[in-house]
Image (spheres, rainbow, N blue to C red):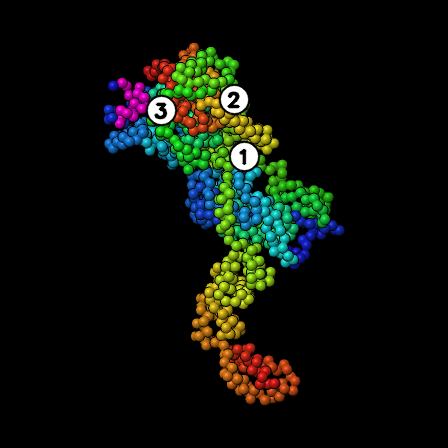
Amino acid sequence: MSNIIDLKLFELVEKIKKKEISSTEVTKAFIDRSQKSKKLNSYITENFENALQKAKKFDEKPDFNKKLPGIPLAVKDLFCTKNIRTTAGSKILENFIPTYESTVTQNILNEGGIIIGKLNCDEFAMGSSNETSFFGNVQNPISENLVPGGSSGGSSSALAAKLTPATIGTDTGGSIRQPASFTGTVGLKPTYGSCSRYGIVAFASSLDQAGPMTHNVKDCALMLEVISSYDNKDSTSVDFKRGPYLKDLNENIKGKKIGIPKQYRVDGMPKEMDELWKKGMKIIQDNGGEIIEINLPNTNYALPTYYIVAPAEASSNLARYDGVKYGFRSKGENLIDMYEKTRSEGFGDEVKRRIMIGTYVLSSGYYDAYYLKAQKVRRLIKNDFDQAYKKVDAILTPSTPSSAFKIGEKTNDPVSMYLNDIFTVPINLAGLPAISIPAGHDKAGYPLGLQVIGKAFDEQNILNIAYSIEKNINFKNNINDWWIN
Amino acid sequence: MDKLSEENKEYLIKRNTNEYEVVIGLEVHAQVLSESKLFSTSPTKFGSEPNTQVSLVDAAFPGMLPVINEFCIKQAIKTGIGLNAKINKKSIFDRKNYFYADLPQGYQISQYKNPIVGEGTVTLDLPNGEKKIGIERLHLEQDAGKSIHDIDPNNTLVDLNRSGVALMEIVSKPDLRSLDEVNSYIKKLRSIMRYLGTCDGNMQEGSLRADVNVSVRKKGSKELGTRCEIKNVNSIKFMQMAIDYEANRQVDVIEEGGSIDQETRLFDTKKNETRSMRSKEDAHDYRYFPDPDLLPLELDENFINDIKKNIPELPDEKKKRFIEKFKLSPYEANILVSDIDTSKYFEEVSKNSDVKLATNWITGELFALLNEKNLEITESPISSKNLAKLINLIKKGTISGKIAKTIFVIMSDGDKDPEKIVEEKGLKQQSDPKELEKIIDKIISENPKNVGLYKSGKDKLFGFFVGQVMKSSGGKANPQLVNEILKKKLN
């Protein structure tokens, strides 16, 4: 039998169901590897002992009808987990232990999953490199001192390094797809309203979505099936027919019309990226799909729009971290002084920067020029996609304009950092589903990803297209376990 | 203030040779009558132990989301219908951002540009006739918690029981012109909401509070003066005191050649004065924006119609009906409809007895009794059923009005059945002409001198004979019959 950690999620599920391996063996294997991989700093909080107990319990009384029977999983530390510390990567929640479970993690538990730990992320999911985390940088297992992407950087790192067989992240402007792309893994951002936001520490409510991060498309379909659910505790949750994504997964894309937006050809994009994109188009054509050039004229406005809408919502969402009820509190002379000290010391620079931007764009006198205008442009961006989908079934683009960069390379240049999200933010603004799949490498040998964007609630379609590309592209991640002595 | 509340008298402030009109608008905060909060399932019971009615949503824990309470929406629509107002099919919940210790989210969810209810009117019943007051809007919002500064000498304590409770903010147009109109407006609003069951109107428990906007202008001027807003006044009396103080303050400023600064003021109930809280320049920038956790509220026509169908008869209609059907005077009708419980009591009594007598007995004896004992009509010591019985005893001639008053006093001690009282105490009216004739004959024969004087023209002595008969019968003689028989015998 091959090494447990090298097995795909669906293989682990099969083997546990066939009683070839036990939940305890699987859980132990991933915990052992996690313990050897502290150098990556993927975890913020480990739940190893508790997870092993749960695994033993599962083995004593196994339920093989579950979709994740006794499967250990580490999750992004943005999901509130009952009795397990939840920090959102921030000092302000350094010691916060929720008494409640997010709907998404509850769905995982309901299907037999076991939480082995909470994974590092940018503070309040604000970042593209995991460098804004209060709990330190995360290493990309691809190469030392390379960022794993962000904000779900701990998730992408842990997944690529095989510390967890699959994971979940959240994606507000690309925070699942960009780190997936940087680590040679698969990441799906579902349609807004597919996964409940209940119990997820909010960054930008109108954009936030949870989604799976996996080694392959099949695992991704399985995870989506588990975590996506209608939830009346989230008013923006949508009651639509979901899945069965795994059962309906197939690589037949015959007759599918795939759009190529010309606006996604940007200056300075590495040659390899452009080649990969063409390779993707060719695979689609070779498998009976049709490539159609489309126009998304407002693409250029997506990034500035996003950097108004997201900070605006964040500035308000983060007001609750005030030192009064829970979390970090600094002593002050009076209430205002306490607020100022608590928030000055509790939040990191990037979070403060975004709170300030958000507060500014909502201020009286500026609201119309910024926030209101951004909302109008957001509508136009959505209209662009609506128009395009009259002609095509899905859209194919690169996931990011470049591959992973070095730790520290962009920390002093926030705008250059924000540009990383140029291909991913329009999708969040339009509320659409999109999947990033690994497609090749740049000349440094770092992974590059392709993004398939779908119509709202059409996750099955993009999974199928991604599945077809995956089968034909033969991507192999080059990871040599450099961090293990 | 009593000087000012004389009937029909204009509320004008005189200084030197100038007369100033006072312009008032009210923003009433009415707590929605609902078992649970606006965006959470926590209970709303008043007077519970601190922080016992708080959910994770109310305390704004990470990842918690608001979910709208449909019942509160219905209550707001009902109230809107009661205010003859436009119900907006699409409304939006916004976040009003500010920091305070008893505001756990760091923002209040409210409605800013798109309220659930638009323009409407409330009709006031004033001594000199009706007056219509415009309603600008009604919107739903969350209440904040309560900061308690006087329990711990070093700390402020926070009670979040009220955090997230649904409030309706009802904004009037600046149509009010006097303290009496303010009194009448608040009472009318309260009455309408109590009829609808959308707010209990309990001012002591803070279910009804108001921000008061006051400005003054020279009599005859059409332009509005600069207004000041007096925050959070919780009784009609304090509203009137605050307005009177504030209006006079503004007139003094203008008379001294100054101008009014638009500002928010606080009313100090102990010193009876308003104080500046913050100027327009220091006004909070609340950074309102649509709450992304909540979708726009879209109402179906049928949803609104279903609510409309179930609106009970409201005070204005009831008043009209009482006047037309029961031939009550507008004054009487007003008194009987202004409070829903009074109107219910009246209808129960009048349905089973006589309308005119019911009106008189309720507005007379019963109100006096309630007033004396400081009771609400729902706590009346005499049930509507027994009052109706009493009235029927009068109506049938079983007892006289005078005896009825005696019985009423006995009834008030433990809601005793008047029929039983009549029986037990033998208070039944003597209406048998033969029996009465016997008494009358006896009185006449015992008083020959007075009979002579009466017959020689001293008409006033008739009262003497009636009195004697009543006395002799122990007050039970039917006064009408006594009159008739006496007249016959003496003439």
Instruction: Tell if the residue under mark 3 belongs to the same chain as the one under mark 2.
Output: yes
The residue drawn where x is 51% and y is 35% is: B291
Mark 3 neighbour density, 10 Å: few (under 14) some (14–19) many (20 or more): many
How far apart, in angstroms, are the residues tagged by discs 3 and 2? 29 Å
- Chain of the residue displaying label 2: A
Q: Which residue is mark 3?
A: A249
| Image side of residue B282 versus residue B431, left or right | right
Q: Which residue is mark 2?
A: A296
Q: What amino acid is at disc 1?
A: Phe
What segment is highlighted magenta in the picture? A2-17
| Image side of residue B140 versus residue B63, left or right | right
> Which residue in the rendered view is the most extreme toward the right?
B17
Q: What amino acid is at disc 2?
A: Leu
Front position in the image: B228 or A160: A160
- Chain of the residue displaying label 3: A
The residue drawn where x is 51% and y is 74% is: B397
In this orientation, does residue A34 appear? no
Residue A189: horizontal and vertical position, in percent? 42, 26
Q: Tell me the element at label 3.
A: loop
Residue B31 among those drawn in magenta: no
Q: Is B75 placed above or below A94 here?
A: below
Say which quarter of the image contains residue A60.
Answer: top left
Say which quarter of the image contains residue B488.
Answer: bottom right
Mark 2 neighbour density, 10 Å: few (under 14) some (14–19) many (20 or more): many
Instruction: Tell if the residue under mark 2 belongs to the same chain as the one under mark 1.
Output: no
Residue A195: horizontal and vertical position, in percent? 41, 31
Q: Which residue is mark 1?
A: B289
Say which quadrant the N terminus of chain A sits in.
Answer: top left
- Chain of the residue displaying label 1: B
Front position in the image: B242 or A231: A231
Say which quadrant the C terminus of chain A sits in.
Answer: top left
